C-alpha cells in the first residue's frame, strides 16, 4: 500500500508481511512513479530486505538510511534525486 506524504513527510511504502523480493519491487515501482525528488519510508518485516534494499540504493546512487525497529520490522528512508 502506498500513501502519499505531504511535502515534508516521506511517502510510506508498507511492505510489512511481504517476503523478499517484494519490498524491493514495491520500492522500485514507487521510484518509477516519482516525477520529482521524493523521500520514501519503506517498512519491511523481512530481515533479508536490508541487503537487497541497501545494495540497490548503492547501485542507483540513492541515499538510504536503515533503522531496525525490532527483530521483525525494518525501516528504510530513501531519497530519490
Image (cartoon, rainbow, N blue to C red):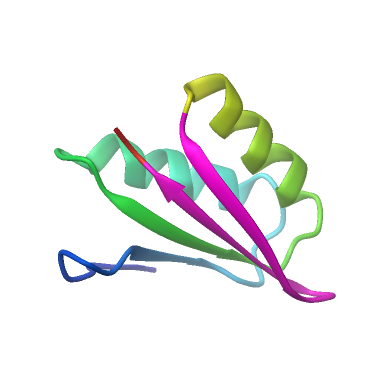
Residue 6's x, y, as percent? 17, 71
Q: Is residue 73 in the magenta section?
A: yes
- In the image, is residue 40 above or below residue 44? above
Residue 52 locus on image (x, y percent): 70, 38
Residue 65 highlighted magenta (yes or no): yes
The spot of residue 61 in percent (x, y) is 48, 24
Image quarter of residue 36: top left
Secondary structure character of the magenta stretch overall: strand
Q: Quadrant of the C terminus?
A: top left
Picture residue at 34% right of the left edge, 47% below the top:
30
Location of the N terminus (image quadrant): bottom left
Q: Residue furthest top?
A: 59
Is 37 left, or right, of 15 in this rendering? left
Span of residues in magenta: 62-79
Out of 66 and 15, give the one closest to the viewer: 66
- Residue 46, picture quadrant: bottom right
Q: Position of residue 7 (x, y in %)?
A: 15, 64
On screen, residue 71 versus residue 36, left or right, reads: right
| Residue sitting nearer the eye, 67 or 74 | 67
Point 66% across, 44% down: residue: 21
Amino acid at each position: 500500500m502506498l500513501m502519499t506524504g505531504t511535502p515534508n513527510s516521506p511517502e510510506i511504502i508498507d511492505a510489512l508481511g511481504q517476503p523478499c523480493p517484494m519490498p524491493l519491487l514495491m520500492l522500485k515501482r514507487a521510484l518509477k512513479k516519482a516525477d520529482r525528488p521524493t523521500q520514501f519510508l519503506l517498512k519491511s518485516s523481512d530481515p533479508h530486505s536490508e541487503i537487497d534494499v541497501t545494495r540497490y540504493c548503492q547501485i542507483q546512487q540513492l541515499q538510504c538510511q536503515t533503522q531496525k525497529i525490532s527483530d521483525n520490522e525494518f525501516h528504510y528512508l530513501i531519497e530519490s534525486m
